[in-house]
């Protein structure tokens, strides 16, 4: 009986053991045969490490190949949030090793709070080798810290190209998700275009990432590199811009708030398009501090706005050549005399002129900027004729250029006011529009295009990337009429006109132009001059071209609250065009101006930031000059 029970138990145990052994054998067979490829891959991934190589961003160069945006070697340190342990200890250690300011530490904490676990947070870039090496030595004690040697974006001209090229920055969560969760967007130090040409040309500039396979130990230590697929750098984008002229025009604006645009009349190539004051794109690309951001965003001169494309201004008297051209197209005799008694009577209103000019024909009216002449002719021909010619000269138009956004202004006519204001157009509206006021709004780029079309007689369209097709002749405008307008603009500068300051110091080259002063607000005391706060003063404008005989270049300058186009804007335009004919003489003039202004753009911006920090009780930065805090908050605007 006992023997039977023992045999039965032995059989049960043996069966169980056999079953377990069979299950184990089957599982081992499944793993070694059916899942052989999977486990080989996992084993390989433990032994072989695959790393992305971020692509080098393509350069942006000017028409002669000079760099406007380039790459340079960079040592940087980032934090990877989901690998970070004891964040406060790590941040404190990095602050000590890298001499981080309190502002930078606060920025790092804020960005860590906002960042997703996979999104790198920049600690510092542009580090010296000694500091970079110090972090690497302490790396075993700093989990979540990622030191990296790579390339950083650099803009040699700084603020002079800020609004033109924009800047780059680390991708945010939205950009990462829009990319289809591309792992490249999580790579420490990888940046994408955030504004300007860096943003609109992103696909051409980015390039393709590479990859590196390396054999490592169980602890992740490198054994040997297996193979590498090099990255493909982004394309080099060549612009129509003249880098030297771009920087010169920005510097020549000095402490003023405004914009300057220079265009090649023959092709439409934009040679310079600058807006000042501006931001330094190097600061944004490296990671801007809260103090610098607040300083820029609080500045009444609005350095964060691209005034050349987004600033909309009444063109003032720079529009009078358009009204004159419309009058000629409507059959007005250019020698017809209009007597100017100091204004024009319309019903019970008296529209004032800039003076008592006496007898005026078209030529003298342009040269002396006589409102009365243009009041008279505009009322005769009507607003629709004027609006038609304005559009033929490029006003009210959005141009096909690679920029994130642009304003196209307003060219009003009899139908526009019905749609917009639900009322009929009046003769008073026509009179105001004829001298560049009222509902009429333009951008500096549009004014430059207008000048180029008047100068060349061609339908010039601005372009930032080089092409070959020349612009066609303007349809519906008599070349003889353009000759008369150009002759009047020649008189403005080189005769008894309103812009003698714009004369070029060259014997064989004359500049033609037209001044403009645009009213900002309607002040009971009269036009906005020195007696009112800066933000209420009139804008100063100037449009021009040179040489008069065979125009090559056109220029438009707007100085916000500059009070007078002849005083504030025309010298900037004249020197910018002088740069194209006699660079050495133009640079000599600029050096004398900057000596009086207190230095170049970088030096003045540094002092401005130092004053801002002192006024707001912020600690000084070592790279900024030391200044005393202001004793008064009275400031009417830029000098």
Image (cartoon, grey):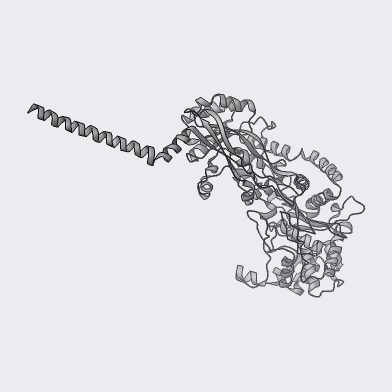
Extreme residue in the left direction = 1
Front-lying residue, 396 or 82? 82
Q: Residue 300 in the image: state x and y as whole percent.
A: 65, 47
- Name which residue lies at 47% across and 35% down: 44
Give left or right: position of 359 versus 306. right
- Name which residue lies at 64% across and 69% down: 417
Residue 397, above or below 580: below
Residue 477, above or below 586: below
Q: Residue 532 in the image: state x and y as whole percent.
A: 71, 50
Give left or right: position of 634 versus 317. left
Front-lying residue, 258 or 496? 258
- Name which residue lies at 76% across and 74% down: 381
Task: Identify the image quadrant of the N terminus.
Answer: top left
Query: Visible in this render: residue 209?
Result: yes
Using the rendered view, name the quadrant where residue 477 is placed. bottom right
Query: Visible in this render: residue 317?
Result: no
Q: Residue 469 in the image: state x and y as whole percent.
A: 75, 61
Task: Identify the image quadrant of the C terminus.
Answer: top right
Residue 521, above or below 119: below
Using the rendered view, name the quadrant where residue 132 is placed. top right
Exactly how many numbered labels are in the figure?
A: 0
Q: Residue 156 in the image: state x and y as whole percent.
A: 72, 40
């Amino acid at each position: 009986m006992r023997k039977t029970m023992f045999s039965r138990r032995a059989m049960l145990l043996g069966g169980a053991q056999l079953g377990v052994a069979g299950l184990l054998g089957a599982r081992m067979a499944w793993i070694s045969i059916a899942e052989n490829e999977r486990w080989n891959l996992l084993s390989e991934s433990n032994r072989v490490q695959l790393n992305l190589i971020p692509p080098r961003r393509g350069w942006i160069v000017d028409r002669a190949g000079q760099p406007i945006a380039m790459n340079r070697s960079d040592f940087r340190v980032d934090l990877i949030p989901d690998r970070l342990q004891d964040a406060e200890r790590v941040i404190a250690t990095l602050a000590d090793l890298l001499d981080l300011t309190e502002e930078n530490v606060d920025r790092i904490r804020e960005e860590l709070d906002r960042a997703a676990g996979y999104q790198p947070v920049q600690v510092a870039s542009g580090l010296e080798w000694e500091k970079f090496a110090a972090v690497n030595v302490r790396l075993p004690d700093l989990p979540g810290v990622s030191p990296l040697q790579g390339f950083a974006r650099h803009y040699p001209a700084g603020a002079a190209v800020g609004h033109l090229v924009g800047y780059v920055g680390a991708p945010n969560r939205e950009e990462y998700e829009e990319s289809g969760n591309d792992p490249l967007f999580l790579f420490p130090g990888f940046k994408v275009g955030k504004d300007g040409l860096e943003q609109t040309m992103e696909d051409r500039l980015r390039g393709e990432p590479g990859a590196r396979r390396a054999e490592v130990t169980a602890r992740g230590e490198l054994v040997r590199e297996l193979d590498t697929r090099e990255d493909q750098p982004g394309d080099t984008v060549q612009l129509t811009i003249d880098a030297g002229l771009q920087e010169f025009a920005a510097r020549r604006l000095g402490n003023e708030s405004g914009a300057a645009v220079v265009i090649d009349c023959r092709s439409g190539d934009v040679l310079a398009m600058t807006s000042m004051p501006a931001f330094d794109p190097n600061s944004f690309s490296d990671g801007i501090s809260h103090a610098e951001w607040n300083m820029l965003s609080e500045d009444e001169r609005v350095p964060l706005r691209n005034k050349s494309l987004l600033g909309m201004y009444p063109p003032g008297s720079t529009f009078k050549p358009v009204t004159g051209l419309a009058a000629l197209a409507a059959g007005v005799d250019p020698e017809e005399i209009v007597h100017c008694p100091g204004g024009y009577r319309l019903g019970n209103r008296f529209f004032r002129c800039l003076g008592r000019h006496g007898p005026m024909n078209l030529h003298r009216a342009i040269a002396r900027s006589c409102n009365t002449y243009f009041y008279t002719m505009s009322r005769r021909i009507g607003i629709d004729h004027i609006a038609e010619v304005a559009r033929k000269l490029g006003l009210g138009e959005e141009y096909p250029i690679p920029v994130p956004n642009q304003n196209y202004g307003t060219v009003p006519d009899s139908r526009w006011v019905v749609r917009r204001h639900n009322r009929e157009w009046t003769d008073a509206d026509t009179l105001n529009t004829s001298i560049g006021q009222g509902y009429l709004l333009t951008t500096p780029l549009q004014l430059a295009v207008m000048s180029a079309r008047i100068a060349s007689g061609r339908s010039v369209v601005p372009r930032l990337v080089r092409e070959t097709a020349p612009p066609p002749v303007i349809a519906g405008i008599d070349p003889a009429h353009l000759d008369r307008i150009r002759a009047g603009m020649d008189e403005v500068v080189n005769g008894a006109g309103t812009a003698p300051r714009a004369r070029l110091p060259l014997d064989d080259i004359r500049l033609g132009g037209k001044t403009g002063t645009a009213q900002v607000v309607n002040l009971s005391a009269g036009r906005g001059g020195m007696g009112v706060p800066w933000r209420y003063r009139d804008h100063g404008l100037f449009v021009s071209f040179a040489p008069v005989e065979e125009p090559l270049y056109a220029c438009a300058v707007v100085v916000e609250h500059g009070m007078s186009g002849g005083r504030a804007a025309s010298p900037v335009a004249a020197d910018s065009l002088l740069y194209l004919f006699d660079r050495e003489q133009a640079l000599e003039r600029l050096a004398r101006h900057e000596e009086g202004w207190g230095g170049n753009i970088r030096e003045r911006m540094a002092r401005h930031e130092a004053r801002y920090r002192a006024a707001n009780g912020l600690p000084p930065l070592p790279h900024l000059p030391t200044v005393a805090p202001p004793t008064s908050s009275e400031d009417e605007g830029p000098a």
